[in-house]
Amino acid sequence: MLCTTKRLSTTFKYSSLASRSFASKASKMTSIASVFASLSGDDPVDLPSRFSDLKKDIFKDNLIETWRKVITQLKPEVEEVAALGSDAIPRIPYNQIETGVDKGIIDRVKKVGSVVVDGGVAEKEALGWKQSIREYAAANKDKVKGFPADDVQVFEFYHSVAQTQARCHPALRKTQEYLLNLLHVSDPQSEISLGTIMSYYDRLRIRKPGDSQFALGPHIDGGSLERWEDAGYRACWKHILDGDYTRHDPFNVSPRLDAKFDLYGAKGGCSVYRPFQGWTSMSDVGPHEGTLKVLPLDLKLATAYVILRPFFAPIRGPQHLDFDDWRLDLESTSFPGSSQGRTQELNSLTHPHLQLDRTMVSASRLSPGDQVYWHSDVVHAVEAEHHGAGDSSVLYIPAIPLTVNNAHYLKDQRACFENGLAPSDFGSGEGESHFAGRMNPNSVSAGPSRQLLGLEPFPCPAGASPGAKRTVDKANKMLFC
């Protein structure tokens, strides 16, 4: 019987450290630098010969013409984004999330895959979260870890009171529900409940004026080589690899559920299906002040370019962008910007047709309490330098739907919450277990807040598909039986 939440006990036992369902990916606490080759300073490593074989296995002759079409269509798209700048990122007032968003804006969000949501959280409340975090850090100053190690600005905090309050805030819940509603399944049996949000615990950032160390260049999370190497992940690009990128649908989640985003146990890699990454601002921040940058090109087109790029190489150098300046490359093991156990990175040499120096645009000015979200396939970055006068502070809070795999992670995350440990994606060690003032799970209010944290059974959404009903049922049994 599906959706039998009322039959389930709302009590549960936290797993012991020895029986955690998701093994930690490191023997000690990881820093955000661990998943970025550009931050860690590691030299590029040649890939094994099997990656040349992989390219030959995947390639089809009609992809040469598809490549021509993609790089030709990129030219006007690049010019449009370069002209618009920050205005290329759509903005939605939070009150429209509640009352109805103009179809033109929805179409724009779905085209470029990113959005700013104004308001929803009062400025005073968001600033209060930042102050609470500073007090939490001060009360535990001898145990605080993060990046950079000598002057922490990306904090390895997961269980502060402020973070929990933000994750559970009604405006964030409503926004995430809205965004997940933009997604769809092509198979009603797909085991995902887009009407059910859950929380994924991540870090926070309080970036100081003048900082130039936390410079995340253009990248796409969710692994790198896995996009081609894993058959399930590769299925997400079926239409692109069949030669018709225009049929690619970034908002169809059915093929994503079999994708393996991490084949190499990447430190800091994300184990859940995360269709929208996001953060909530705790400061007033604008361009050149250490804020987010995204690539708001047509998401279908940009994704097609990234997926096709390993099959082609420049003849005279990457600065030459015309079709005739590129050749087929199936012999090398090169997957530009990709490496084992890292995120997918991009720059003007690895992906020159994107003209990232012109098309990576900063989010326009944000106030405390504003939210920013971007699709998991969107190229994004953090401004290399913070030239503002105040801090650039954010809470990393994505929009996550319930899936069976996500529920497995949630079960482990719940145990980590109770014990004050870093979630398994972020390492092991003592974490915040000995921190004063961390959040007590028993203090979370009943209802939606406890549900998204895995502390109460999930209700079955109205009109749920067969797959969604099964997902909720399996998740509740896993978490509470």
Image (cartoon, grey):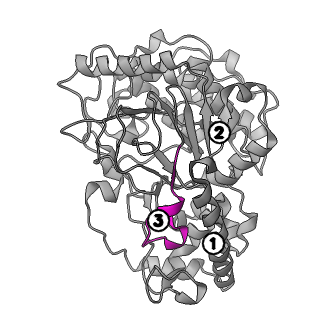
Residue named by callout 2? 91
Say which mark, if any, is on residue 225.
3
352 magenta-colored: yes
Mark 1 vs 2, N-terminal side:
1
Q: Between tags 1 and 3, which lies in front?
A: 1
| Mark 2 surroundings: few (<14), some (14-19) or many (≥20) residues within 10 A | many
Q: Is residue 425 above or below residue 228?
A: above
138 magenta-colored: no
Residue named by callout 1? 75
Tell me the distance, in whole angstroms, between the alpha carbons under discs 3 and 2: 33 Å
Quadrant in the picture for residue 39: bottom left
Q: Secondary structure at mark 3?
A: loop
Q: Is 443 left, or right, of 72 in this rendering?
A: left
Mark 1 vs 3, N-terminal side:
1
Who's the residue at 50% across and 83% down the image? Answer: 320
Q: Is residue 149 above or below residue 48?
A: above
- The kind of residue tagged 3 is Leu
Q: Position of residue 261 (x, y in %)?
A: 50, 54
Question: Given contact means CB atoms under 8 Å apart, are the residues at marks 1 and 3 in contact?
Answer: no
Say which mark, if any, is on residue 207.
none
Tell me the distance, in whole angstroms, between the alpha carbons under discs 1 and 2: 25 Å
> Magenta segment range?
347-363
| Mark 1 surroundings: few (<14), some (14-19) or many (≥20) residues within 10 A | some
Mark 3 vs 2, N-terminal side:
2
- The mark total stands at 3
Who's the residue at 67% across and 55% down the image? Answer: 255
Who's the residue at 31% across and 50% down the image? Answer: 34
Question: Given contact means CB atoms under 8 Å apart, are the residues at marks 3 and 2 in contact?
Answer: no
Quadrant in the picture for residue 337: bottom left
Who's the residue at 74% across and 66% down the image? Answer: 246
